[in-house]
Image (cartoon, rainbow, N blue to C red):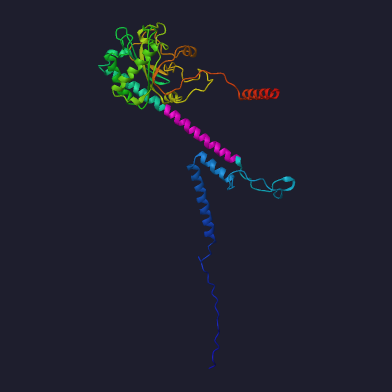
Amino acid sequence: MAEAKSTVIIRRVKKVQGGGHHGGAWKVAFADFVTAMMAFFLVLWLMAATTKEQRAAISEYFRNPSPLSGKSPAPSPGMNGPGGASTSMIKLGGTADMAKGQKDEMGRKRDNAADTDVDSRAKDKRRLEALMQDLKEAIDKSQALEPFKDQLLLDLTPDGLRIQIVDKQNRPMFDIGRDQLKPYTVAILRELSSFINQVPNHISITGHTDTTAYSSDAGYTNWELSADRANAARRALVAGGMSDAKVTRVVGLSSSVLFDKTDPQNPINRRISIVVMTQDAENAALAGAGQGVALGKSLHDADTQVPDLSGAAATGTATVGTPVEGAKSDAAPPVAAAAAAPPAPVLASAGTAAARPAGPRISSSAQVASATALAKAAEAAVEKR
């Protein structure tokens, strides 16, 4: 049997690989997209979290890429293009930007200082209003002060809280022509001392008299009497527990600031005025302490003027007791009247130097001319000899 010839069959199978690896290019693109989105939302968050001033500063930073503060030096001729035009593509920041930043910083400091002053004044006002309310309530409730309600007057002035203790016809604070306090006046002042200690403000004490002339030939006048009475009130307040360091000044104004101008001899004009001063009033009172007055300076500018403790333009008025009909709040005397009146003796005040009279002034050029003329005259006399 013949050997059968075998047929070789070659079968080609085409293999299809599904879902195989296609490379990592898409991952790179996706990572770029996620990074861009993260940066975008980060910018949105920063814009929402920063203030307008901070955004302006960031914008200014990117507009001025120069690392140096100040104006860049002038370019050399080789750095300029034709016609002297600059070839630089970057506009450098200059001193104008730095000066603007300094001005802005100074402006912010001034604004902060102004805000601090406003806050301090507002705090002062609230403190004094609370003190006045406490005093009114204490006077209403106190049996010791009940009989003297109509002799205690409270009001707010630009200088601070003013407490006035006034005379009555049948109940004077002092004996006539004396600086000795009546027992009930001492009781009033001691009651007031505890309230004054509640606030950190300093006080000024002013004595006033009516226009009745003091009957004495020893040179003791209403000026000395009003100052002595103010100092007696200070001693009573200190004896009642008030700190002596709270007193800024003690002044006698005689009858220069009348309470009732329609009746200069009204007993209400005889009074003691205690002002719980604001910080501004205290600074003004101590502004000239220890400073002398220059020669030739007018008395109007000197520290020897009678201080205005009246607080004529009161911001608010609260009167305890019944005010006298026709009586007005203290008004400062005109400048001319203050200059004409004799100076008030100040027993405890900010140290002030007396003004010296303005003498004749000789200029330095006149002195040189005079010396030259004398020298020439001497030479001529020698030549004649």
Specify the farthest residue to the front: 385
Q: Is residue 5 magenta?
A: no
- Residue 307 screen position, x and y as percent: 44, 18
Residue 126 vertical placement versus 10 (above, below): above
- Residue 205 screen position, x and y as percent: 37, 19
Q: Name the main secondary structure of what is drawn in magenta.
A: helix
Specify the farthest residue to the left: 143
Along the horizontal axis of the image, is 254 left or right of 10?
left
* Residue 377 visible somewhere in the drawing: yes
Residue 177 vertical placement versus 160 (above, below): above
Q: Depth check: 2 or 149 in front?
A: 149
Residue plotted at (49% across, 45% down): 46
Q: Does the magenta stretch include residue 112?
A: yes
Tell me the magenta residue range: 96-121
Q: In which quarter of the image is residue 314?
A: top left
Question: How many numbered marks, from 0 up?
Answer: 0
Q: Depth check: 299 or 383 in front?
A: 383
Residue plotted at (45% across, 24% down): 284
**Dividing the image into 4 quarters, which one contains the C terminus?**
top right
Along the horizontal axis of the image, is 20 left or right of 217?
right
- Residue 244 screen position, x and y as percent: 33, 25
Residue plotted at (42% across, 8% down): 261
Specify the farthest residue to the right: 83
- Residue 188 screen position, x and y as percent: 29, 17
Q: Depth check: 189 or 179 in front?
A: 179
Q: In which quarter of the image is residue 173?
A: top left
Residue 215 vertical placement versus 349 (above, below): above
* Residue 164 visible somewhere in the drawing: no
